[in-house]
Image (cartoon, rainbow, N blue to C red):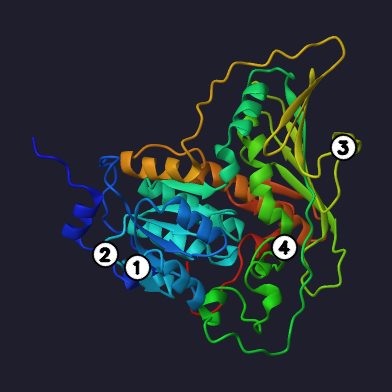
Amino acid sequence: MALRPTRRQFLKRTGLASAAALTAGVWSETVRGASRSVNEKLHIGVIGVAGRGGDNLRGVSEENIVALCDIDERRLSGAAADFPAARQYRDYRKLLEQADLDAVVVSTPDHTHAIPVVWALKRGLDVYCEKPLAHSVYEVRQIREWAANGQAVTQMGTQIHAGDNYRRAVEIVGAGVIGPVSRVHVWQGGGIRPGKRVASATPPAHVDYDLWTGPAPMRPFHESHFHYNWRYWWDFANGQLGDFGCHYMDLPYWALDLRYPTSIEARGEKGHDGDNEVPMRMQVDYQFAARGQQPPVHMTWYHGGWMPEGAEEFGKSSAVLFEGEHGRLLADYGSRQIFMTEGRTAATPAPTIPSSIGHHAEWINACKTRGQTTCNFDYSGALTEAVLLGNVSYRLGGQRLDWDAENLTATNCPDAGQFIRREYRQGWTL
């Protein structure tokens, strides 16, 4: 019996969608479903090679790194020294035309996640993308739909999900040790870096600032919104909630099978003298409907030093607190503690969730076997949408949003549309 071709062989035989076809949204005829030997290395392109991108590059470095892309020539050349056979690009659109790719890793700033991810999915590639999945709720939904349409193997970069501590916490909640959970508090202690706008400035010669800006509004170059600092500007990211919400809210999402909130209401304080408007301190209240036998859930996010009343006793600047009928569970990245109500004892369940082989390794293995990942774009996309909706409410002055997830609409607030789907700079399209 003839063997099915590998994805790479299929691509060579059928050719690739052109850049024009990708721009027009045409799905290429890349085959899905053909497994390969786990010993056969993937051909991976990496978009964004420093910071988190450097960590992700190292995470997939045992595969064949055939393409590297970065708008910073110095960062690109530094990464290329370790992978001299890889082709180098400043423009990810050019990288995505490379014929021998099996998968891509996207670690650009938030405002440039969606375009390379969607284009890669349209081409039929598997994708690993840093958190949060995209800059806007609309972009996230587009990513999820393209991933589902093409049966892509995907993973979002919430690396803590692969740790054993989260697994044990999920097992405790799932086994009913603290009883049905209807209240969750999630707090993160960090604040933001104030930044200043400038009237005009010249970017460094080694930086392609136009490509870096991409679909965002063009602003005069300044270090206070460039490498790393972009996290604290609405044009490029989503502040502290966007930076850490996907990590800490991941635990209750996993443990309680959460999907879409029914309402979202935020308040916050700018609390700094920078020109960037993202809040130093923030609280977001999410309401979730009942799921099967599980009750409705009220989950609250806090950052910048705000935390639930009485949380000081735990001595945790960042943590997740589940409140059940019979007790409470406190957890962070590496620890957990159960507090039972008087007269009850905790029976810690035996482990049932297998240990991860590693967050990047899980994705790589699934790409080869056409298996599943724990942080695929469907699960992680629903999580990211909720995270971003907190900022939508805040930017509308704390307006409560009654959320219709199916139609991507705040039914009580038409003004939310401007933040649910942002306008792209001329010349850029999803």
Compared to 403, does 184 lie above or below? above
Badge number at residue 311: 3
Closer mark to the observer between disc 1 and disc 2: 1
State the separation of the CA atoms marked 4 and 1.
50 Å
| Horizontal relation, residue 262 to residue 267: left or right | left
State the separation of the CA atoms marked 4 and 2.
43 Å
Residue type, numbered disc 3: Ala
Residue topped by disc 4 = 415
Q: Please provide percent x and percent y for residue 384.
A: 61, 49
For mark 3, does the 10 Å Cα neighbourhood hold few (<14), some (14 to 19), or many (20 or more) residues?
Answer: some
- The reply to whether discs 2 and 3 touch (Cβ–Cβ < 8 Å) is no
Closer mark to the observer between disc 4 and disc 1: 1
- The reply to whether discs 4 and 1 touch (Cβ–Cβ < 8 Å) is no
| Labels in figure, total | 4
Q: Is residue 329 visible?
A: yes
Identified at 49% across, 34% down, the residue is 356
Compared to 81, does 385 lie above or below? above
Task: Give the SS element for disc 2.
Answer: loop
For mark 2, does the 10 Å Cα neighbourhood hold few (<14), some (14 to 19), or many (20 or more) residues?
Answer: few
Indicate the quadrant where residue 175 lies: top right
Task: Give the SS element for disc 1.
Answer: loop
Identified at 44% across, 57% down, the residue is 105
State the separation of the CA atoms marked 3 and 1.
51 Å
Badge number at residue 84: 1
Badge number at residue 99: 2
- The reply to whether discs 3 and 4 touch (Cβ–Cβ < 8 Å) is no
Identified at 34% across, 59% down, the residue is 123
Residue type, numbered disc 1: Pro
Closer mark to the observer between disc 4 and disc 2: 2
State the separation of the CA atoms marked 2 and 3.
54 Å
Q: Please provide percent x and percent y for residue 404.
A: 64, 46
For marks 2 and 3, the one nearer the N-term is: 2
